[in-house]
Structures are given as structure tokens and as C-alpha cells.
Image (spheres, grey):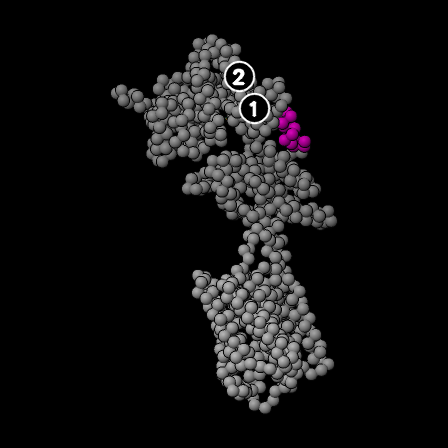
Amino acid sequence: MPRVVYALLGTLLVSYLASLVLRSEGDTSLLVDGWLVAGFELVASALCFSRALGLRRGRTVPLALGCALLSWSIGDVLLTAESVGGATPPTPSLADAFYLGFYPLAYVALVLIVRRETRSLIPATWLDGGVAGLGVASVCACFAFNTILRSVGGDPLAVATNLAYPIGDVLLLALVVGGTAILSGRRNAAWIMLATACGVNAIGDTFNLFQSSGGASHIGTVFDGIAWPTAILLMSMSVWLRPAASDPLAAPKAPGVLLPGLGALSGLAVLFVGTLRHLSPWALGLAIATLITVGIRIAMSTRSLRTLTEERRLQSVTDELTGLGNRRYLFQVLDAFFAEYDHRRGPERRLAFLFVDLDHFKEINDSFGHSAGDQLLKQLGPRLAGSLRGSDLLVRLGGDELGVVLIDTDLNHASGVAERLLARIQEPFMLEGVSVRISASIGIAFAPADATDTVGLLHHADLAMYRAKLGASAFEFYKADIDAGGNRLRLVDELRVAVETGDFVLHYQPQVDLHSGEVTAVEALLRWPHPRLGVVPPLQFLPLAEEAGLMRPLTAWVLDQALAQCAAWRKDAHELAVSVNVSATNLVDAGFIDVVSDTLARHGLPTSALILEITETTIIGDFERCKHVIAQLCEGGLTVSIDDFGAGFTSLAYLGSLAVRELKLDRGFITPLVVDGEGRDLELVRATIDLGHALGLRVVAEGIETAGTLDLLARIGCDLAQGFFISRPVPASDLALHADFRPAVPSVDELKAS
Ligand code: C2E
Ligand code: MG
Ligand code: MG
């Protein structure tokens, strides 16, 4: 801001005020009151233009205001010129045209400021401004027009000119008050200064009105003289004030209701007074307009309140990620069902709740990142909804848990739906260009048969789901006798007891050397024979053991049993190695390496008798630590194998830095291999085998279910094979160690040799 110039203008203004006060009544000077004041105003308007020139953006406001002030100043220059020699200027004069030109330009500036500040304003706030502005305008109109009509008569052009000023002022005031109502709650010094300037101008105009209607007084002359230059100075200064930086973290303030409220009251008051005494039709018209705006505002508020309430309700029952209903919605629906069930006399309605829990969702998140997990859930919603009836309800309970409510259903229908859902879940998902498969477990409970309240129904479906996770079937119905009390805690307790008493069995699955056709190693696979649940497979209870901190003793038990068995085989002249699976918690256990070497020593076995399998996902989960532990195991002479290689979807780049000796290709690659020896899967397996060999690793293929796959793998150079075709995992006593699994086709070595 050109402070020096404004300081000078301010000093001039104060001096002018002093001169007005000290002057005797009726004493006017054309030089001071005319030319000097006009010059003062011209400088103030020039400062607005200089501000506009200095800005790169937002020039329009200072430009509009500069033009407004220039128009006013020219009016003053012309009036002074017309008054030279004591002449009385006519009404209307040319000066009036310029004076009146100030108003539209000032309106433009005011509207532009409000627009600039309130790009995101809702119509209701504009209406608030309208109510405040119109209300004030109606009050002002009562006084302004009555006085004018009383004081001026005769020439219609003169009447029109004299009317134009109060109309212009009333509109200006209406805009200022309306704008203040709209901008309330925002710190905008420029607006405050501009609004004050308009107020001062209105005071000046009011005094002028009284002066010219015969109520002249000395004080009136002083106010009349000082108000306009003061208003002009403030307007000019306002363009230099910058809007305060907004705080992006602060919650947006709601616009105040004081000014719109006062506006509405003013409109009412004017109409009331209008019934008692004569008021100008302008005032009455503005008052009616105020109240109409209030009416529109109320109607709009009511409508948006209704929409908002509905939106809020929808939001509160919708899962943000998938757009499905959420847990709250499920509770509402089920609570309503049970409430009705309590009061119903008619035929009983049956409802089934399916608790769907995705398997291995965590691995998807770990391998691809959480956004891929989100993507999967988003794809899942519409896919599952497609296999439900319109009257069924699909909700997301949270995480990887979904729920389905089937109304008027029975056992057959519910199991049909569960099968359909499982089939749809197992279809591949495209995540970042990669095709990924998942599975799920479903627990089903019926109402009112299995539960008579929402919490009970969900709990029972959860128990059944958990049994599905532990058992062989992907979905299970709630069974009171089995599930009652059969919750996680109880299972953990049972598992703890089983670990203490060694209540597990090991099954062994042979690995065949594809070059010689002989069994050279076996993989030890853990089973939990459970009194109620039957034989529980490892993937179902191992997560529980991890959670309960039981992996350390469990792996120690497996190592001990497997190595004891290995020693027994070796005693019978079977030079086998045994493969033992190791979990992530074992690797973080500082004493693990000692446990391994102590167990080997106890059974009198060399390190070559043991292979430790670590899954690729475990390695990815904590790469640096795993790399370190693997290096230590390797130093001790142990063979470490990367299990389920390729299931972790990561790059092969890190392979070279790990001290592993074996790769076990994930059976997801092997089982679908087409026997005719073509296709992308085959190329992938071939390339991985070649890569493993290039790094000096032995390559094992697991999941071989057919003779064709076995032959194919032999042909492309795989070293070892494991799978149901050779043997399922069986107790040690059932293992056929002498079978010859020499492939039916010549191996690469044999082909090279021939
Ligand atoms: P894994 O180490 O990849 O074991 C191979 C799994 O594939 C075994 O499942 C086996 O029964 C199955 N399998 C073998 N050949 C075929 C085939 O031709 N077709 C099909 N469809 N499947 C085949 P299982 O016994 O259920 O073990 C699952 C996983 O549990 C194992 O995967 C391993 O990661 C883990 N696990 C098993 N025992 C232990 C253990 O003692 N400790 C630890 N930490 N994990 C274990
Ligand atoms: Mg394994
Ligand atoms: Mg495996």
C-alpha cells in the first residue's frame, strides 16, 4: 500500500475537517470545498487503478472500484466547474450523470468480492444475504423516499434524478448488509472497510438530503462535507487489504443468522407500520420481497433438511468402500425382524444369516498392498449381489467379512446360495493386471430356529463359519450340540492342551527325484486329530497356534518327531531327507537355530537329513530378517527351501541374495499345467525352473496330480516332484518308499545324452 500517499490524504482529510468545524456557518470556498476535494478524490481513485495494475490476478475489484470513484470524482469536478461564479447548477446536471455512474460500478465491485469469497456457497446463504439486504432496504426506503417526495416536486426529470440517489444508496446498503450476512464468520478486512465506507457515504447522503430539504445546520454541513471524502478514502484503501489466509484445518463456520433475522423482522415491521400509516410503495414492495425471500428460504431449508436427513441415514448404514450395507444396517434389519417375530401371531417366517469370511485376504494385502485389497472388495460386492435375489441383503461387516440375509428360506436354498457365493468368490480377480484367486468360508445360522436375537444369530453363524474354516467343507450350518461353547477361546485351550500332550500326528508325503525315479525326501505335514471336529488340516489351526504363541513348542515337536522318523528310516537303509515347514514366528525366535541343531544331534543325524521350508510370503513379510536367519542356517550346513514359490506374486530379483538351496514351485502353477505341453503356465514354470538352475538351486514341483504333469515336468528339467499322483500325505507306516516313479518320457538329461 502506498502508505505515504494515504497518510498525506488522511492528513488532508483531518485538516479539511478542522477547516469545516472552524468555519462560520454558510461560509464555503470553491477552491477548498470544490477543487481541492475533487483533486483529493481523483488521487484516491488513481490509487485504485495503481493497485489494479500491480496485481496479476483479481484485478477486477480494484478496477471496478477505481472506475466508480473516478466517476464520482468527475462528478465533483463538473459540479465545481458549474458552480464557478456562484452559479447554481441545474437539476439534473452533467455532474449528476457521473455521480450516479458511481452506483452500478460500486455494485459490481461489491458483488465481485462476495463471489470471490464464496465460490462454494449454497443457494440458502445467498438467500440469507437477500433477506438481510432487502429488509434493510425496506426500512431505508421508508425514510428516504418519503423525505424526497415531500421535498421535491415539479420537473419529472428533477424528481427522477433526486429519486435515483436514494434508490442507489438503498441498493448499496442492501448489498452491503446482504454481503455482510453472507460473509459473516469470515475475516475479510477489505470487505469491512468497504462496507464501512458505504455506510459513511449513506450518512453523507442522508445529511445532504436533510440539508437540501431545508433542515440545514452547521453540524449537518460538517458531516455533509466530510462524509464523502472519508468514504472515498476508505474505499480506495480497501483495495489494498489482502484477505486473511484461511486455515485449511479449521472447520468451515456456518454463516450467522443475526443479519438475515433482523432483515426478516424489518420486513415484517415495515408491513405492520404500513397498515397504520402511509408508507412509500417502494418500502412496502421491498418489505414484501423480503418476506417472499424468507418464504423461499424456509421452503429450501425444509427440503434440504429432508434430503440431508435421508443422506445421513444412508451414509450411516452404508459401507464407504464397497457401497454395500454396513454392520449397523444389518443390525437394523435383523432387529426389525426379531421385533416383528416377537409380536407376530401369523405363520412363521424363516431367515438365514450367512457369515462369509474370505480366506488369505491378508496375503493379498501383504503382497499387493492395501489398495489392491480394497479393489478386490469393491469387485466382490457386485459379483456376489448378482447371485442373490432382490429380497436378499448383502452387507460388509468389516475387514474381509461379509454377511448375507436370506428371508423366507430353507436349508436347501441357503446351501444353494452358499455354493453359488463360493463359486463366484473363487473366480479370478484382476488386481493391477494380475489374476488372483481367493476362497472363503461360510457359516449359516437360521432365525428363529438357531437364535432369537441379532447378536445370537451373528454369533452362531460366526461359530459355524469358524467350523467351516477348520473343517473340510467351505460352508457349515450352525449345530447347537457342536458349536455351543465351541468358540475360538475353547479351541485355543484345546490346542494348548494338544501341544502340551503332543496330541498331533505327522503325515509324510514323498518327493521323487525325476532323474532317478527314487524317493529321496519326504515332507512332514502336521495334522490335529480333534475329538469333535475330526482331523483338522494344518492351515486351519496353525493361525490359531500363531495367535496363541504356540508355534515354538509345536515346531519343536514336529522337528523331534520328523527327525526321529528320519533316523528310523536311515536305520532301515532309506537314505531319506525330511522336509519340515517353518513359520514366521520360528524365524524371529532367537533360539530356533539351536533347537534345530540340538534335535539333529539328539537323533544322530547329519544336517543333510533336514530341509527347512519357509514360504515365500513369510520371506516377503520380513525380508531382511529372513535373509539373515537363512544365511545363518545355511552357514550351519542346513538346506533351506522356498516353499510355495510364485504364490507371493513378487519379483524374482531378490532370489539371488538369499542363501537358499531349493525352490518349491507353488502348486497353483503346477496343477493347471496343460498336458499337451503348451500355454503360458508352462512357459512360466519352464522359465522359473531355468532361473532356479541358473542360480544353482534345486527345483521341486508340488501338486502333481496326473502322470501327464509328472512327465511334462521331467521333460522341462524339474529336479523333484511331489503330489497326490505320487502319494497323498500318509502316516509313516503307509509310505511306499520303494515305488519307482521314473517318468514315462525321457528327461532333459536323457535327451541330451541320446
Ligand atoms: P505346503 O508346505 O505347501 O504343503 C503341501 C500341501 O499341499 C499339503 O497340504 C499337501 O497335502 C498338499 N498337496 C500335496 N500334493 C498335492 C496335490 O497333488 N494336490 C493338492 N491339491 N494338494 C497337494 P497340507 O498338509 O494341508 O498342508 C498345508 C500347509 O500347511 C503346508 O503347505 C504348510 O505350509 C503348512 N504346514 C503343514 N505342516 C506344517 C508344520 O508342521 N509346520 C508349519 N509351520 N506349517 C505346516
Ligand atoms: Mg511345505
Ligand atoms: Mg507348498
The magenta-colored residue range is 482-494
Residue denoted by label 1: 551
Which of pointers 1 and 2 indicates the residue nearer the eye? 2
Q: Residue at x 35, y 35 (%)?
A: 679
Q: Residue at x 47, y 35 (%)?
A: 367
Disc 1/disc 2 C-alpha distance (Å): 13 Å
Q: Residue at x 47, y 11 (%)?
A: 605
Specify the quadrant that holds the C terminus: top left
Residue denoted by label 2: 595
Q: Position of residue 484 (x, y in %)?
A: 67, 32
> Would you place residue 608 above or below residue 721 in this image?
above
Q: Position of residue 400 (x, y in %)?
A: 55, 39
Q: Is mark 1 within 8 Å of ligand 1?
A: yes
Q: Position of residue 571 (x, y in %)?
A: 47, 8
> Would you place residue 353 above or below residue 122 in this image?
above
The numbered disc on residue 123 is none
Q: Nearer the viewer, residue 391 or 169?
A: 169
Pick out the residue farthest to the left. Answer: 754
Amino acid marked by disc 1: Met
